[in-house]
Amino acid sequence: MGNECGKCCSQTDGDSELTDGRQTGAAADPSTTAGGPDRKSGVAIGARRSNDFAKGALQNRGLKPEVSRSGQHFDFEYTNGSKDQLDIEQVTRLQAVVRGFIQRRKYKLHTTKMHHANGMYFKREELFETLKDKDEKFDADAQVKNVKYTYKSTGSVYDGQLKGGFRDGKGTMTWTDTARYEGEWSMGYACGKGTFYHADGDIYEGVWNNNKCNGYGVYTNKKGARYEGYWKNDTQSGQGTEVWPEGSKYVGQYVNGKKQGTGKYSWADGSVY
């Protein structure tokens, strides 16, 4: 877009509620921990709950199995004499996938919204409208002016500092749908610390570079979901923490807006993966 911000922001950051993560990190290796349902690993906790669930479900079907554990499997012996075996880690992974799907269905995707917002706001025509000459170059030595300007091209309003025809310094940009950005600018671009208020109530507060979330930031969904961590070009990337109002929580790595790498997913009922 030309005249890009060159003075700030570099970093590492679904989808979830905040992103679309289907991978929830590496589970603990069952072989490295003492056997038994009391060990404090995601596999053990999930397995204990899987045991109760499976036994109850089969009893309801009239099979009334005897359930025992051998290594990393549950052994089922039914009243009709047949036997079956269930892998603990596979059940735990399935639980994580199903619960993750339910969570993603309940909230809008934060990263999707940030990408969409960047297409709706921070228009290129706004960038150049305040220049007397469109071929004019940014003058770092120009005098800083405090202005309130209504853009003819979009109807949005900028109230803040202007230098050399560009938004530069601190200022607030308000769009016609009431969405607004309050924070730092450099050579016409949102760059530095700033807060973006979406028209529907969602809020991103953190570091910006070239009109995008880049660096450490916090995104709060109007329904109570929250992501706190690193971003890159409007997507979660790097270490982050995502929490939901009913008590679920994910702490771990993100890549391009998806949960990927090492992480820990905790649910309100005490299950952990």
Image: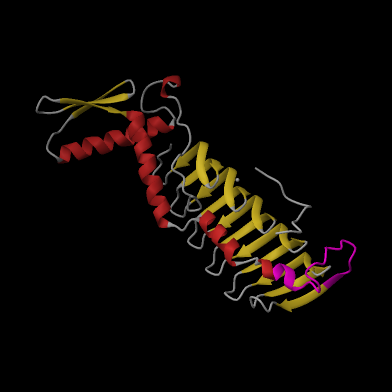
Image coordinates for residue 117, horizontal then vertical, percent: 57, 63
Residue shown at 55%/45% (left/top)? Answer: 256
Point 50% across, 45% down: residue: 258
Residue lying at the far left of the rendered structure? 80
SS majority, magenta: loop
Left-right relation of 139 to 39: right
Q: Please state the extent of the stretch shown in magenta in the rendering.
A: 126-145
Q: Position of residue 138 (x, y in %)?
A: 83, 63
Say which quadrant the N terminus sits in: bottom right
From the viewer's side, name the closer residue of 166 and 128. Answer: 128
Which residue appears at 39% of the width and 31% of the height? 43
Query: Residue 265 in magenta?
Result: no
Residue 107 lies in what quarter of the image?
bottom left
Q: Position of residue 260 (x, y in %)?
A: 51, 39
Q: Is residue 251 left or right of residue 106?
A: right
Residue 88: image location, x then y, percent: 33, 29
**Camera-side residue of 193 and 37:** 193
